[in-house]
Each structure stands twice: as structure tokens, then as C-alpha cells.
Amino acid sequence: MASVDVVVHIVDDEEAVRNSLAFLLGASGFAVRTHASAAAFLEIAPGIKNGCLVTDLRMPDIDGVELLRRLNAAGTMLPTIVVTGHGDVHMAVEAMKNGALDFIEKPFSDGVLIDSIRRAVDKANSLLDADAAEARTRDRLATLSEREIQVLKGVVEGRANKTIAFELGISPRTVEVYRAGLMSKMQTKSLAELVRMVMGIDLDSVARP
């Protein structure tokens, strides 16, 4: 099932190709936006919140591999499908090394392209879900006091309550109280869930009340 939330961005310097792909994908239920060049797409890429990309490899201004390199460098990479002509397999492999999700060789069937785009749309949705989950976690972390953050650091590092208590100069019972409070604020039911939730987040960067 196609997702109307994810916009499929088509980058190709040939107008006929852009229009053909846009018609096919639109008829299959996808939201589509076309771009006549990689440079034009790079200008709007930072504002894309939920999208995937279909790009030709060989283009006169910036080729598909260079496009992916620039998206990666700018932190605006999207799930990407590259379309390659005969003899472009080496470039397609380079595109994969630079983060492309898939590559399709011309000529391709409509079904092959649509199946690949569905995978890209699913990937885009999963990335958006992950970003939303991290935002929720950061919002909850922002409600913790400085002492609760200190206890949380100890918990995430696998330290026992007695060790955390000794390091912070408080009693183990007080650590238990802080731990119960921060788990309530983080809306977690288990230690494992709490650790998974904050893994990868720099707790020193969290704004505290």
C-alpha cells in the first residue's frame, strides 16, 4: 500500500522521463515531486521531513553519486533508488556505498520500480518514526532534575545502586527513590526499556529545569 505521507522526489534531467515516472507513481498512489537537476533538488533537500528519492545516475550538472555524497555531507540523506543505464553498474555500486537503498537497471518494468519505491517509503516512514521517538525521549529527559540525570547516567552505565550512591554522596535508598521517579517521568516500565530509550543520546546535552 502506498503512503501519501512520504513524497517521492524524482531527479532526472530529461523532462519526458520525469513526467513518465511521475505519472506512473501518481497512478500507483504515491505523492510525487519532480526536479530537473540535482542542484535544484539540493536546494530544497534540507526542508524535506519525510521523503524518498529516485535519481538518474548520469546527469550533466551533478551526477547521482555526487548527489548522494552531498546529501550525506549535509545530513539530508533520504532513502534513495538510483536508476542506471547499461554499463553503469560501477557507478551504481558507488552509489550504494554512498547510501543508496537500491539501484535499478534500464530498461525496467513498472512493477520492479514500484516494489523498490515501496521499500524506500517504508524506510522513510521508519526513519521518521525513529526521529519522533527520539524527540519524545528528549522531551521527557528535559523534565528530569540534575540529580535524576546523574542517577540515570549511573543506571545506563550499569552501576549498582550502592555504587551510584557512593559516587553521588547519597544513600542507596535515595538512589532508589530517584530511580523510581525518573522511570515514572520517562514513562518506562523496565530498566531494559529505559536503557534502550536513552541509548545514543548524550545525556550531558539535555536541557534541564
Image (cartoon, rainbow, N blue to C red):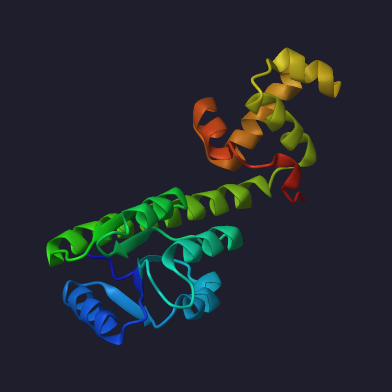
Residue at point 41%, 55% (across, down): 95
Residue 6 or residue 142, whichever sits in front: 6
Expressed as whole percent of the image width and height from the top left, the position of residue 48 reads 48, 71
Which of 96/85 is in front? Answer: 85
The residue positioned 36% from the left and 53% from the top of the image is: 90
The image quadrant that residue 84 belongs to is bottom left
Q: Return the x and y of residue 102 as percentages of the image width and height.
A: 31, 54
Name which residue lies at 31% across and 54% down.
89
Residue 122 visible in this rendered orientation of the protein: no
Residue 101: percent from left, percent from top: 36, 53
* In this rendering, position of residue 87 left or right of residue 44: left
Give the left or right position of residue 179, taking residue 191 as reference. Answer: right
Q: Find the residue positioned furthest to the bottom.
A: 15
Quadrant (top left, top right, bottom left, bottom right) of the N terminus? bottom left
Q: Residue 19 sits in which quadrant?
A: bottom left
Residue located at (64% from left, 27% from top): 156
Question: Where in the figure is residue 110, as x and y percent of width and height?
Answer: 14, 67
In this view, the residue in front, 171 or 68, is: 68
Q: Residue furthest front?
A: 87
Let me know if residue 172 appears in the view.
yes
- Count of numbered tags: 0
| Residue furthest right as drawn | 169
In the displayed structure, would residue 56 be above or below residue 75?
below
